[in-house]
Image (cartoon, rainbow, N blue to C red):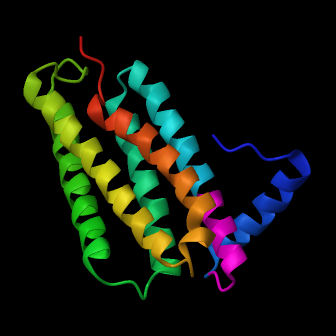
Amino acid sequence: MLLVHEAESRALTNRGKAAVDNKVDCADDYEVALIWLLSRLEHKRQAIVATRADVRVDVMLDLALECVDLVVGFAKENCSFAVGRDMDEAARQIRDFEASQVALRVRLQNNSNGNPPTDDAFQSLAKRCFSALHEGTAAYFTVFTGRFATSRAALPWVEAAASYIVDLKKLAREPLPIR
């Protein structure tokens, strides 16, 4: 998704790690931290897609929770001042995701043969879960975008984030292969 030259990649990695691990103060560091966050999220999304083919719902949910932890952690560190509808919507969607993934895990544990249930209710619950992940992530991305001083400054981030959100939406439409 993101193509960066090798030397620039090392610099981005070092600055990105520092910016993600610590509160970001500089606008340039904030953008680098966002791109670093996005690269970590993309790595997790690709892993979700890979485990989807094997219908490893438990692993998919673990990876999705890691995505949530990354996004929420970034928001707490860098957007603690943010309030309003976007932040409320993001938190609501993440709560919906968390509730849905718990319900999916319960259904998985209750299934005696060890395979995910194949009924429509399970598929619907999986769609609800991954749709909430998509919507919550998109809402947090809106909050992150609001921290830029101008829309022009936010443009590189917005373009990269939009690409990720589109790919996440594909997963939300059909989280589990239909058998």
Q: Left of 78 or right of it: where is 156?
A: right
The magenta span reads 24-37
Q: Locate residue 161, reporting x and y percent.
A: 52, 53
Q: Residue at x 32, y 84 (%)?
A: 83
User: Image quadrant of residue 58?
Assistant: top left
Question: If the image is split into quadrants, where does the N terminus sit?
Answer: top right
Q: Confirm whether residue 110 shows in the render.
A: no
Q: Quadrant of residue 2?
A: top right
> In the picture, which quadrant includes the C terminus?
top left
Where does the image place residue 163, in percent across and percent down from the top left?
A: 51, 44
Is 29 covered by the magenta stretch? yes
Quick check: is 25 in the magenta stretch? yes
Q: Nearer the viewer, residue 30 or 110?
A: 30
Q: Is residue 93 above or below residue 174?
A: below
The answer to whether residue 77 is seen in the rendering is yes
Establish if 31 lies above or below 177. Answer: below
- Identity of the residue drawn at 41% across and 19% down: 54
The vertical placement of 115 against 86, above or below, is above
Q: Nearer the viewer, residue 114 or 53?
A: 53
The residue sitting at 62% across, 71% down in the picture is 153
Name the residue furthest top: 179
